[in-house]
Image (spheres, grey):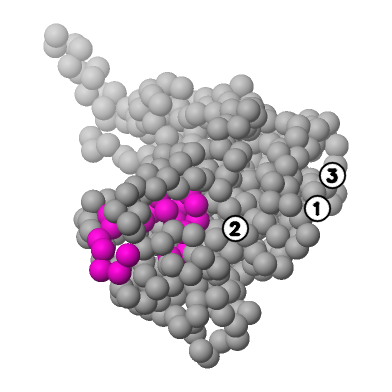
């Protein structure tokens, strides 16, 4: 008999908090001086802490992550390699040698490898090399802005018009500026937007963390001798328990420092975002506030593991032997919950939208679930809530029909 395909049931599991919470959508609002702050679990996208996460604010050189993503995409598509030589135009060479807006001088007509340009854009936050990479991507600065806007819109980042590839204000581009925009026009994104960009870059191209975790790199100097370019992120490799491996800083004239980081918190990879520490703040304060964000999380949230002991359910499978089958979670899921609260599954709210039909193999996925909580403080994600897969703990055979039983009986008589 032809095997009947397993129908995947959608199980909606509502987890009820024994102690109700109120407040922001995240678990807590961090008490930091920066205008915006965010902490996100990298794998699940859960927003653990948030302060003013949706306001569009100047992000300065964090903008460079977009052009780096687009370059990495070209590499993955085979259009270029890390060794591809890139010739610097006269305009960008002149711009790069103006120390008021650039920190990595480039020589006109000289060829630099894509790898060197990425290193310079990521570590010392070179404005000129980011602009060179933008021309690799799109052929010109203006065409790059259009492509970059289109890219981030596919990630759900809307209402944004990028002004520069480097993150500088429009007026700082001198002869390369957009004359239709005011000089103070600059790239503005929210902390959530920044986290989304960082997540896309690191998830798709994790090798970028090998770049951002470097303390310094060698770069071809304009006089023929290599120079050392140092990272702008002293938190990388610092003696903390969070093991920061990236990602990018930004410095604004009027809003202080910004930083998006990739770190480890309670065994979980997390994204940290701190935007706009204030005009009069010292440079290192952005890292102090980032660590404070994580320290406050210790007192506000706890990591909870949900596994087969938490999520299991007996279900009835039609036309099957046995009919009652136990489903368990295929693999554990980890979520942060308020520290002083307890979460228990409410199986009364278990709903099966499609009946399960035999045969079913052991460990075969027979149902999918979307995690839902009654508390808004545990349902905030950058994207969709994590999906759970449920598997059968045993092989479920198709129950023989009456005709098959008669046939078996007859065959047994004449054995």
Query: What secondary structure is found at the residue carrying circle 2?
Result: strand
Residue found 20% across the figure and 12% down from its top: 412
Is residue 243 rendered magenta in the image?
no
Quarter-wise, where is residue 146 in the image? bottom left
Residue found 50% across the figure and 73% down from its top: 164
Highlighted magenta segment, given as a residue range: 107-128
Q: Earlier in the sequence, mark 3 or mark 2?
A: 3
Disc 2 + disc 1, Cβ < 8 Å: no
- Mark 3 and mark 1: Cα distance apart in space: 24 Å
Dot 3 crowding, Cα within 10 Å, few <14, some 14–19, many 20+: some
The image position of residue 119, as x and y in percent, is 40, 50
Residue on which disc 3 sits = 21
Q: Residue furthest left?
A: 414
Q: Nearer the viewer, residue 376 or 225?
A: 225
- In the rendered view, would you say 285 is above or below 93? above
Task: Please give left or right for residue 172 compared with residue 23 in the image.
Answer: left
Residue on which disc 2 sits = 250
Task: Please give left or right for residue 400 compared with residue 13 in the image.
Answer: left
Can the viewer see residue 93? yes
Dot 1 crowding, Cα within 10 Å, few <14, some 14–19, many 20+: some
Can the viewer see residue 9? no
- In the rendered view, would you say 65 is above or below 227? below
Residue found 35% across the figure and 27% down from its top: 361
Q: Earlier in the sequence, mark 3 or mark 1?
A: 3
Quarter-wise, where is residue 401 in the image? top left
Is residue 110 rendered magenta in the image?
yes
Disc sitting over residue 33 in the figure = 1
Q: Residue furthest bottom?
A: 180
Residue found 57% across the figure and 24% down from its top: 308
Disc 3 + disc 1, Cβ < 8 Å: no
């Amino acid at each position: 008999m032809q095997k009947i395909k397993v129908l995947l049931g959608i199980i909606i599991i509502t987890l009820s908090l024994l102690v109700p919470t109120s407040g922001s959508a995240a678990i807590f609002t961090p008490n930091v001086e920066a205008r915006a702050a965010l902490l996100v679990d990298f794998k699940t996208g859960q927003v653990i802490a948030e302060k003013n996460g949706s306001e569009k604010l100047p992000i300065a050189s964090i903008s460079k992550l977009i052009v780096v993503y687009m370059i990495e995409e070209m590499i993955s598509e085979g259009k270029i390699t890390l060794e591809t030589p890139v010739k610097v135009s006269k305009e960008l060479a002149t711009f790069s040698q103006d120390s008021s807006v650039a920190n990595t001088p480039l020589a006109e007509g000289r060829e630099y490898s894509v790898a060197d340009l990425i290193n310079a854009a990521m570590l010392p936050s070179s404005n000129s090399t980011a602009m060179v990479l933008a021309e690799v991507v799109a052929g010109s600065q203006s065409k790059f802005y259009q492509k970059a806007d289109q890219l981030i819109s596919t990630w759900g980042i809307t209402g944004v018009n990028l002004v520069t590839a480097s993150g500088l204000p429009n007026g700082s581009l001198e002869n390369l500026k957009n004359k239709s925009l005011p000089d103070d026009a600059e790239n503005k994104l929210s902390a959530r937007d920044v986290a989304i960009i960082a997540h896309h870059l690191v998830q798709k191209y994790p090798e970028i963390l090998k770049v951002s975790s470097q303390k310094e790199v060698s770069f071809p100097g304009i006089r023929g001798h290599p120079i050392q370019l140092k990272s702008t992120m002293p938190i990388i490799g610092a003696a903390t328990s969070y093991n920061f491996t990236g990602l990018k800083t930004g410095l604004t004239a009027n809003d202080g420092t910004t930083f998006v980081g990739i770190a480890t918190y309670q065994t979980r990879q997390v994204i940290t975002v701190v935007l706009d520490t204030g005009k009069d703040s010292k440079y290192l304060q952005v890292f102090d506030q980032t660590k404070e964000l994580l320290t406050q999380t210790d007192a506000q949230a706890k990591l909870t593991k949900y596994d087969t002991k938490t999520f299991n359910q007996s279900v009835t499978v039609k036309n099957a032997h046995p009919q009652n089958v136990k489903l368990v979670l295929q693999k554990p899921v980890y979520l942060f919950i308020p520290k002083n609260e307890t979460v228990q599954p409410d199986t009364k709210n278990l709903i099966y939208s499609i009946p399960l039909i035999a045969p079913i193999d052991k460990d075969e996925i027979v149902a999918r679930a979307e995690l839902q909580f009654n508390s808004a403080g545990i349902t905030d994600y950058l994207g969709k809530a994590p999906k759970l897969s449920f598997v059968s703990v045993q092989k479920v055979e198709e129950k023989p029909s009456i005709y098959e039983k008669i046939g078996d009986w007859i065959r047994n008589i004449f054995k």
